[in-house]
Image (cartoon, rainbow, N blue to C red):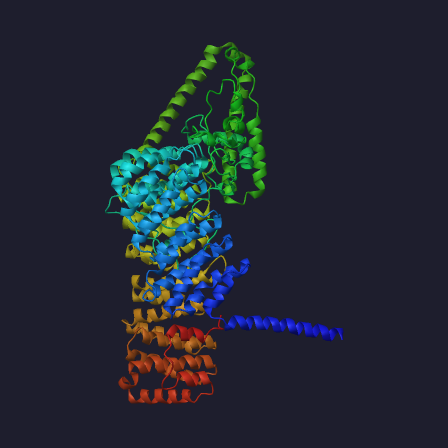
Amino acid sequence: MADLSLLQDSQEDTGGLLDFVSQDEMLTPLSRLDKYISSENVFNRQMVARSLLDTLRAVSEDEHECVSVLERIDRLADDSEPTVRAELMEQIPHIAIFCQENRPSIPSAFSRYLLPIVVRYLADQNNLVRKTSQAALLVLLEQELMERADVETLVCPVLVDLTAPDSNDDVKTEAMAIICKMAPMVGKDITERLFLPRFCEMCCDCRMFHVRKVCAANFGDICSVVGGDATEELLLPRFFQLCSDNVWGVRKACAECFMSVSSASSPEVRRSKLSAVFISLISDPSRWVRQAAFQSLGQFISTFASSSSAAGQFFRDEADWNSSTLSTHTHTPPSSETPLLCVSHNALGCEEPDVAEEGGGEQPAEEEPEVRDPTEEQEALEQDMSQQQQEVSDPEEEQEQDRTTGSSQQQEVSGPVEEQDRTPSSPAEQQEVRGPAEQEDESPSGPQQQIPEQELFNSFHYWRTPIPQIDLELELQGPQKRPSAPPLARRQLEELIENLEPHIDDPDVKAQVDVLTAALRASALDSALEDSAFLEPRAAQCEPFSTQLLSADTQRCDDGDSELSDCSAEEERRSSRQQDVVPQALLDQYLSMTDPSRAQTVDMEIAKHCAYSLPGVALTLGRHNWHCLRDTYETLASDMQWKVRRTLAFSLHELAGILGDQLTAAHLLPVFNSFLKDLDEVRIGVLKHLYDFLKLLHPDTRRKYLYQLQEFLVTDNSRNWRFRSELAEQLVLLLELYSAQDVHDYLRPLAFCLCTDRVSSVRWTSYRLVSEIIRKLSSCSSLLVCFLSELVEKFCHSQKWSSRQAFAFVCQLSIEEECLTLDQFSEHLLPPLLRLASDPVPNVRVLLAKTLRQTLLEREYLVSSSPGQQEALEHTLLSLQTDVDKDVKYFASVHPANTRLNEDAMSTTSSTY
């Protein structure tokens, strides 16, 4: 009985639920919306917001009900729950698209009902709601769903008000970011009238470094919108202030956008003012500012190019080298499959004021930055490498600490690499928690003086052994009484080398070991020279005017000769770098990017950035100044990091086009030859642009590489099938560069080899290669007959069904692409093709049926062929139409489905991998 009662209760509950569902189904869409929009359950209201678009589509035929739904949206916008408001804002762009498509039914629906909600949410107290509304606003602008008048009268004034001095700090920073994102969309007129005055004001915001950082990060976009006159008159003075900001994150943002700012400036301003500012960024005390500046150096140099050369206003990533390494084309727009609205913690691409990023901390100033020689930095590095590797962290791992709102409560926590270099702009910036490693690369101010208490954690004292006091009286007493220097640095070098030796297989680690070993040898040499002064014979010490003076004179003469030779070599090296296209200081800094010390003091991948921008720099300087870059290019080409060589390999064809055939043959061919024998990661860069490079060479030089094409069939990893697929595509292009005889002798074996590849994608690309070889050889009947006979023997008579199917596909493709005449096809390919009608594998017969029905008959082959061929073709079609396989029957029928050739062919070989 108990079980029976439980069953009855369960049935009653189920029945109640079914009644509830059935009641909802009986309600109209508008009634269902009214029922749940006032529900006390938050999840119900969220579902209402999520289903608004479906509700609108359900009532789209009734204009009155559409307006009623839009009125409910305005009511839902006042919901007290932030998650409901955020969910509603995510649906606004989709609803706006619906209103745009149904404008005749509901005119001005967006401006009246939706836009006010978006604008109101821009100042919402909840961070998630604000972020969602900002992302929605950008989507609406990108999709051109807003009227220009609405943007100017409703949106822009609100954003300008949100950036007022008395506005909330977080809201101000986010609104400034939105303004910068909107500027390219709204155009020059609105930007100059409404946004530019406030942007200039925010660049000088002394209290909020986050706002200054947003302005610096987007400075180039604003300059591009307003043009050259406004840039030089209003923006450049602010930009120079930001470049000398006391926050290294602001200066780093300036370095990253320097190319865009330079592109909007006149050549005179670029050379006289921007170059000097950029040099100061390269020598900045902060490692991360120097790193960003060196990464932008090549792009900045490219802006000095003449208008005729247009050297690289856009630099692309390594993955984009397929089409062009350096060009003036704009970037590819995002895919249409991207969701309209995707909100994350940083949906707008700007930094969050409450969760700062790598460049966040502010520091009070104590001293001006000093430009340090790279050799000095390397010597200092060799003394403290063991400590530095433990202390210096990656900038991406740094995070600024949370800060409270308001100037009275604001306290910034500096990251481990933030330096102390300039005067604070406000008392709020002086409230910091500083650690012993916050500063770096600063010069000591009077090292022989007593160290003040506030300087105890100066980076110079922290990283390095303090310089000892020098006793002049003791120094004058002679070398025999001089105490020896403590061998602390030597011990540190030995320990560091021992720690790195287990990882010597890593090329980067090996480079560090080489540098440290050289320093250790220099230290040992200095120690030996110092010890020899104490071990001189007593007679030599008693006769200082005989032995010592003679040796001193001899040493002085040797030193003089070596100094003269060194000076002449240095003078020759400097003269080889002279040019008049860009400021020499910029070029010298660019050429120094291959210095090993730069990898230790700036960026381990600085050589890769140098290689990446080298085509742009070469195009700017011109081929007559190639002597300035030749040594640097050869150094990069032999770099131990394969990523550096890979970058050069992807841009080799671009550089060849810049230099011309003579310089290419003299200086690039050796590099090209070395890359051919390099790792697959480097060889793929050469292979992807093999045709582009070889076509620039002299025909005789180009022909020499026919022997080396087969080397691309061998890869480090046999599973790297994309390498072979790329080879097949390049061989198709290379056919036009060689004669028919060369194609038959050298490219034919490669094509047949690729046609039997284990991977289906490689084979199908190779079939197209075979058809193009047929076209190339069609002008020479003897070579064509020889090639077609080999094709029939290797494929049509093969024991593998996939090879016989490949023969049918090559025949079909040859007719489709008109690679040979119908007479040539009838004589050499048609008879073996018709014999495939009795093939035991249905897939082969299916492709045969497609070839006969969709290719030959469409070209009225039966009309132009001989009676014997017509009879044979009709007999084959009849046998295929009565085939036991239904697919063969279908494709051999009178009216087959009109499907694309490649899709049909691939569908019949889906299991041939």
Quadrant of the snapshot with the N terminus: bottom right
Which of the pair 50/351 is nearer the observer? 50
Residue 626 makes an appearance in the image: no
Residue located 47% across and 77% down the image:
801
187 left or right, relative to 566: left
Measured as percent of width and height from the top left, residue 707 is found at 38, 59
Which of the pair 470/452 is nearer the observer? 452
Q: Residue furthest right?
A: 1
Measured as percent of width and height from the top left, residue 475 is found at 51, 13
400 left or right, relative to 213: right
- How many marks on residues? 0
447 left or right, relative to 557: right
In terms of image quadrants, where is residue 554? top left
Measured as percent of width and height from the top left, residue 359 is found at 46, 39
Residue located 46% across and 31% down the image:
377
Residue located 43% across and 20% down the image:
555
Which of the pair 529/579 is nearer the observer? 579
Measured as percent of width and height from the top left, residue 708 is found at 39, 58
In terms of image quadrants, where is residue 229? top left
Residue 228 makes an appearance in the image: yes
Q: Residue furthest left?
A: 308
Q: Tell me: residue 446, above or below residue 727.
A: above
440 left or right, relative to 243: right
Q: Tell me: residue 493, above or below residue 324.
A: above
